[in-house]
Amino acid sequence: MEFIELRNVYKTYYIGDIDVPVLKGVSLTVAHGEMVALMGASGSGKSTLMNIMGCLDRPTAGEYWLEGRELSRLTADQRAMVRNRKLGFVFQNFNLLPRTSALENVAMPLTYTSDLSDHEARHRAREMLVRVGLEDRLDHEPSQLSGGQQQRVAIARALVNHPPLLFADEPTGNLDSRTSEDILRMFKQLNEADGITIIMVTHEADVAKHARRMIHIHDGVIVDGEMNNPETGCVDAGLGSGDSV
Amino acid sequence: MKVYRTIRTAMRALRRNPMRALLTTLGIVIGVAAVIAMMEIGAGSSAAVQKSISSMGANVVLVMPGTATSSGISFGSGSVTTLTPDDADAIRRECPAVKTVAPAVRARVQIVYGNRNWVPSSMYGTTPEFLEVRDWTIVDGDPFTERDVLNANKVCLIGQTLVRELFDGASPIGKEIRLKNVAFRVVGVLGRKGANMMGMDQDDIVLAPWTTIKYRVTGSSLQNNNQSAASATSSTVNTLSNLYPSGQPTLYPQQSDTQAADTPMPVRFANVDQVLVTARSSVEIPVAIDQMTALLHERHHIREGESDDFTIRDMTEMSNTLSSTTRLMTNLLLCVAMISLVVGGVGIMNIMLVSVTERTREIGLRMSVGARARDILRQFLVEAVVLCLVGGAVGILLGHGGSLLVRMLLRWPVETSPTAIAAAVIVSAGVGILFGYYPAWKASRLDPIEALRYE
């Protein structure tokens, strides 16, 4: 059994009487410990695919298996549980709580896990911040941090529950190239050293280069890289990036 | 643990925007402060009104002897001689709902001081407890004592009207006045009460030990012990009274004064004309009446089904006035309280709705890290409740401070009301839940994807 397996996933939005098909039969497998870049132009369906894999949304049809469990028919509360325990999210615009210290931002997901005491939660949050190199910024609020630092706080927050799978939605979109490099290096390190599976949504070929495998999605279907095949999943920047940059 | 954590999260969220939180709670603060201040001032004035009404005798219950009937002719209320001071003592001892008891005998005689004379409208022979029953104060001198009652000492207390009529406003303490030629020493002056509800001057009064009045002044004995026959005494003084058909028909031949003097009646009837009783509170009046009825049945050996030889009357009219006044005041305050709290609650709802819209991204984020709909609902609900409770607490302090200030500056009667405080806490939490629920529910219904994308 693969770590992630999508079988013939469809997603259709209903806007009034009009059906808008966004995903048209996506099948995909991702092995444990992979770092995958999900590429595609805007409107190609990559965000929808990420939302489904991130348990934020349900497919209209098809199956989604994560760690041997079929998730496409879960209730909202069950999906919340999966997000809390198995998944971490890093967003383009960081989404940190304003006027809240870095430490509290990182500890926030733990408030929805009832089995940790406050002391343990703070300890764990501090540990994570140390790991992303912000041990001297624990009590800083987001407004006192640079973009790169904010994104590192966001990464620490995503990791605080020790999820096996991390989603990054345009993680470097709001960062300059130097800090982007830092963040991507950190992803790489997390992937290699800690074995965290990372799925990164991007439309920049430069960013995608850091991943060992690229999946191109175009108009709701995967055009390239749908099988787990490390040899071909390398630099292949021609398809998705041209029209979106 | 979970609740504590939710409360802390809510506190943290509120601390992020302290100015807004402050302004939001202001509605509740003012509402609760107004409620508390109104309740305390209202309770104070209500207590003052109650006190003044009860000083008119609203709590007083009268126990009167029953009707004597002879050959089908009734002598009217109070004409049997079965009510005694011992009954009064027994009532005091054995009826727990009764606060004070004073037996009283009545008289109506002329008072002479120097070259002045006056007939007071009420003259009571009683015990010192009468002053407590009628809530009467002594403004000059001292009340007479139980010892005076036991010894039938010739001492009396007089009302303000008598001071004016007999003494021209000079202090009467220690002076001797004559009641039907018996010299009494004035030991005290009663405070001013003014007219009662019927317009009768309550200050036109003389109080003396009941033993003195009964045995030395009215000289109640076998011939004249019942009131209907008492007019016979005056007939000996005023011969004109026989000219008018006002008196009761004489059923039996009256003894002449000479006959009466020749056959002295050593029997002293220790009956009283009435017993004045106060209940512990106005609501306990019916209980007190039941207890007294049972006790007097037992003491007077009245069997089931036999007619009573006593009657008990309470001041229903006055106590009704009392309770309706209190109810009106309470309801009025309640209306004001409700309106101000609803206004405060609408303020809370308004700001919580704005807050939910403004924090849509935060809600999306919380959902994406695993918050369930009910976690979000609880968070926003707790925020609203915390706002309301903090506002309520501040309001209680402010309101209490305000009412203390009123007491200090305006000298209004104020009563701390723990029920008002408890109600304020419960109501402000209730307002928080009521008006915080809709915004919180709206927040929990958000779609995480939409919420995360919200700009």
Image (tube, coloured by chain):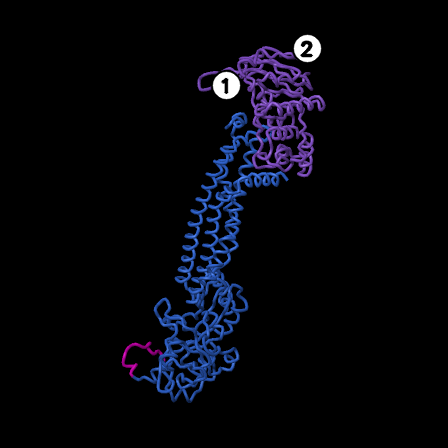
Q: Are marks 2 and 1 in contact (CB under 8 Å)?
A: no
Q: Residues within 10 Å of mark 2 (few under 14, many from 20)?
A: few
State which quadrant residue B61 falls in: bottom left
Q: Which mark is residue A13?
A: 1
Q: Is residue A7 left or right of residue B432?
A: right
Chain shown blue: that is B
- Figure colour of chain A: purple
Q: Nearer the viewer, residue B284 or B395?
A: B395
- Is residue B142 something that shows in the picture? yes
Q: Secondary structure at mark 1?
A: strand
Which amino acid lies under the numbered mark 2 shown in the image of this protein? Glu
Mark positioned earlier in the residue sequence (2 or 1): 1
Q: Secondary structure at mark 2?
A: loop
Q: Which span of residues is magenta-colored?
A: B240-253
Q: Find disc 2 in the rendering and name its residue.
A: A231
Q: Residue furthest right?
A: A193
Residue B156 lies, in percent from the top left, at 45, 80
